[in-house]
Image: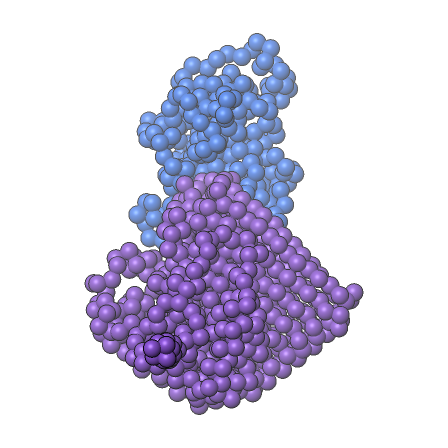
Chain colours: A blue, B purple
């Protein structure tokens, strides 16, 4: 059974249809990259999978480990192992990152009938993961994302991913706003998380990130549909020829696998 | 015949005039307010003549006043002649016999708030001797405080035991002519607390935590007077997180604080009177006058968490009389359902180098309306005065409102004034971010709101702060989603 099975997914915001029939299968252990020009629906796909209610799903279905993903509340999806690294991480004034993350970890543990982590075990876990993405542990006692630089916010996302240990990680333009050193660090964090039990969907505009996070599959999204799929070499081809190349009739609709 | 009828009329009038004397055994005064009502209350409390005189002066002044209308609140007119101004405490035989007789909904709320079992019964009004002996607990602490010269007792007791202090300080900060509601309180106040901390004494415990069970008897017209003599320190806690039900809809309390040279008074309030049902019906109208005066180097700090009542009208203020004195106001006001709050503070800078800080957090949910009203006045002689004001509003949902009315009056050019204000909507984005990490909607709302209020909560004594957080959680239930 595939971990994630997206079938003919349509979604809209108010009167604008953004996703117009997405088909995608992701198996455990795989890293898929979703690429495409601005406005093609990449971020919408990521947010719909996470359950953002700004988008209305009008058609299609999404199965996650055999369950109807669209039927679950966003927090339920998270507890079931779906993680979204936000393109624009949100600030929560007055709530420390540690407190926030502990609540998240324990919500998940509770969901799975496990005992809550105590403060000591939690801090140990956090310390280890913060080192992995070279996140200054002083940031953890500050309010969530408040006053963080763009790079710190993105590191914080990957750090949270490491702590929450998801089954399906969706990275929404995690590379945007990162300098090359930060990019390498973030990619290192992501690569450490690669495992046969975990799948990742990496949404990106640029090929650059894929130099460091090498995908198994690349899909090109255009006007709400996947118009081309291939291996990692597709990203390089796109880099060389530009998205216009896909638009010039090289698009080959991809059948549901 | 004419003479006879005249005599009869006189006799009737006389009977009416002194009616209260024969009625002194009654449990309650009849509804309505006149001089007899005031005399009745004073007689019931066996007050010395100076108290009765003071009450009567207040009452006569009150009759010349009109109810203020400037606040940003709406309520049907109050008929002051419909109100019962005095009733004796409930007799034990009329109380619930045990927790089994108490409204299960109320008990459920206590449970959510994590109120200790032994306190639940007392809060629910179960006859005390049927539950546990709270009196002995209270007495133990009272003895200990007494050894240090600290006086902490019901106001009515202080009138008898320490009349010289009452005469000296009562009305010295909030005069009986102060405002409509304070004047009404002066005429008919039922009881309250009296605290005196002698020179140089630091009160070893937070006053009223151990006594809060008794708070239920303070009634609708509460009067509190706290005096910290030179160099004294005291922290006073008022109210508690348990929802307080009361048959009396109108509440008009007065609190006066006197901080002598080098003294510190910290006054923390959690107000959770019944807010009314979904449509605001039956909620408490809470009109409160709180003010303190700081002498040289003194500090008064007000911290309030206001979550109850259908109407809150309250401006805890500080008169910074002495040089180098400090006034602080930290406030969280939450309005949900149909609640309306018009609250804030006044800082009056008179002495040199006086400093004031105002942190106000207003949260509006449901159809709640929340108004911050603050005044900062720097008088001519207040050289180098400083004020910092931060006033933040948070909106939850589409039907609520936040309003801000800051008044700043500066008459000395050496003053430093800072004012920051913000209004934010509890973000869909913030909620989704929390949800995406596995945190459910209600926990997310309470986490975000508590984060918003953090600067105020950290001013609360530890135990109170934990309760305040839980209280917000419970008060916000059902406001989102």
Determine the residue positioned at 65% across, 73% down: B320
Give the number of marks: 0
Q: x%, y% of residue B267?
A: 51, 71
Q: In which quadrant is the C terminus of chain A drawn?
A: top left
Instruction: Tell me if B175 is positioned left or right of B163 in this view.
Output: right
Q: Is residue A142 above or below residue A36?
A: below
Farthest residue to the top: give it. Answer: A249
Q: Where residue A80 sits in the image (x, y, percent)?
A: 37, 39
Q: Residue at x 55, y 85 (%)?
A: B168
Q: Is residue A232 visible?
A: no
Q: Which of these two is toward me, A137 or B295?
A: B295
Residue toward you, A216 or B47: B47
Q: Is residue A43 visible?
A: yes
Whether residue B60 sits left or right of residue B85 in the image: it is right
Q: Camera-side residue: A19 or A27?
A: A19
Asked whether B303 or B18 is in front, the reply is B18
Residue shown at the point (69%, 77%) measured from the top left: B323
Measuring 64% from the left and 40% from the top, which residue is drawn there?
A181
Residue B119's place in the image compared with B421, above or below, is below
Q: Residue furthest front?
A: B1
* Placement of the N terminus of chain A among the 4 image quadrants: top left
The x, y position of residue B378, in whole percent, is 71, 67
Q: Position of residue B382 (x, y in %)?
A: 73, 71
Figure quadrant of residue A40:
top right
- Vertical side of A171 occupied by A163: above or below: below
Question: In this picture, is B427 found above or below B253?
Answer: above
Residue that lies at the very extreme toward the right in this rendered image: B413
């Amino acid at each position: 059974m595939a971990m994630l099975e997206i079938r003919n997914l349509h979604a809209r915001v108010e009167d604008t249809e953004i996703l117009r029939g997405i088909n995608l299968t992701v198996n455990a252990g795989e890293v898929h990259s979703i690429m495409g020009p601005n406005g093609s629906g990449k971020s919408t796909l990521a947010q719909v999978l996470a359950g953002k209610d700004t988008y209305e799903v009008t058609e299609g279905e999404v199965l996650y480990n055999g369950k109807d993903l669209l039927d679950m509340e966003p927090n339920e999806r998270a507890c079931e192992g779906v993680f979204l690294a936000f393109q624009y991480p949100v600030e929560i004034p007055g709530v420390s990152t540690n407190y926030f993350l502990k609540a998240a970890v324990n919500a998940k543990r509770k969901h799975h009938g496990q005992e809550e982590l105590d403060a000591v075990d939690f801090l140990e876990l956090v310390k280890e993961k913060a080192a992995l993405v070279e996140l200054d542990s002083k940031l953890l006692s500050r309010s969530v994302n408040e006053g963080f630089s763009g790079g710190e916010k993105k590191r914080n996302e990957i750090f949270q991913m490491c702590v929450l240990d998801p089954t399906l990680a969706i990275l929404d333009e995690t590379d945007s706003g990162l300098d090359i050193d930060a990019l390498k660090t973030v990619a290192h964090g992501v690569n450490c998380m690669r495992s046969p039990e975990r799948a990742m969907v990496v949404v990106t505009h640029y090929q650059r990130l894929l130099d460091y996070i090498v995908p198994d599959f690349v899909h090109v999204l255009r006007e709400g549909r996947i118009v081309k799929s291939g291996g990692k070499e597709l990203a390089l081809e796109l880099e060389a020829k530009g998205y216009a190349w896909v638009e010039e009739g090289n698009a080959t609709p991809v059948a549901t696998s | 015949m004419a003479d006879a009828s005249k005599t009869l009329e006189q006799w009737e009038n006389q009977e009416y005039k002194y009616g209260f004397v024969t009625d002194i055994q009654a449990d309650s005064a009849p509804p309505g307010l006149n001089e007899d009502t005031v005399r009745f209350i004073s007689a019931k409390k066996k007050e010395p003549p100076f108290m009765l005189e003071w009450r009567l002066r207040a009452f006569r002044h009150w009759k010349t006043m009109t109810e203020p209308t400037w606040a940003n609140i709406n309520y049907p007119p109050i008929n002051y002649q419909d109100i019962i101004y005095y009733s004796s405490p409930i007799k034990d035989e009329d109380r619930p016999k045990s927790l089994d007789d108490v409204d299960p909904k109320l008990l459920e709320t206590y449970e959510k708030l994590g109120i200790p079992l032994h306190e639940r019964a007392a809060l629910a009004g179960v006859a005390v001797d049927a539950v546990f002996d709270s009196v002995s607990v209270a007495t133990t602490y009272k003895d200990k405080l007494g050894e240090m010269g600290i006086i902490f007792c019901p106001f009515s007791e202080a009138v008898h035991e320490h009349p010289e202090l009452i005469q000296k300080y009562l009305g010295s900060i909030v005069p009986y002519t102060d405002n409509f509601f304070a004047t009404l309180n002066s005429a008919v106040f039922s009881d309250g607390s009296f605290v005196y901390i002698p020179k140089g004494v630091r009160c070893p415990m937070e006053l009223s935590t151990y006594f809060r069970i008794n708070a239920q008897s303070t009634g609708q017209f509460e009067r509190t007077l706290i005096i910290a003599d030179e160099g004294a320190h005291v922290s006073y806690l008022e109210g508690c997180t348990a929802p307080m039900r009361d048959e009396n809809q109108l509440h008009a309390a007065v609190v006066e604080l006197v901080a002598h040279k080098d003294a510190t008074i910290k006054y923390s309030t959690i107000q959770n009177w019944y807010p009314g049902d979904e449509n605001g019906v039956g909620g408490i109208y809470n009109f409160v006058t709180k003010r303190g005066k700081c002498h040289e180097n003194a500090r008064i700090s007000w911290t309030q968490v206001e979550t109850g009542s259908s109407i809150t009208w309250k401006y805890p203020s500080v008169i910074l009389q002495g040089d180098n004195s400090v006034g602080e106001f930290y406030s969280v006001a939450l309005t949900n359902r149909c609640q309306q709050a018009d609250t804030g503070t006044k800082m009056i800078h008179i002495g040199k180098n006086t400093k004031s800080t105002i942190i106000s957090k207003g949260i509006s949910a449901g159809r709640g309306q929340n108004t911050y009203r603050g005044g900062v006045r720097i008088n001519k002689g207040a050289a180098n005065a400083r004020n910092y004001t931060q006033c933040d509003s948070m909106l939850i949902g589409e039907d609520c409102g936040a309003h801000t009315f800051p008044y700043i009056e500066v008459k000395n050019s050496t003053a430093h004034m800072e004012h920051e204000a913000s209004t934010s909507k509890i973000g869909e984005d913030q909620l989704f971010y929390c949800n995406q990490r596995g945190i459910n909607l209600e926990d997310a709302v309470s986490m975000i709101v508590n984060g918003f209020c953090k600067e105020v909560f950290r001013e609360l004594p530890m135990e109170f702060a934990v309760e305040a957080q839980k209280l917000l959680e419970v008060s916000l239930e059902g406001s989102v989603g």
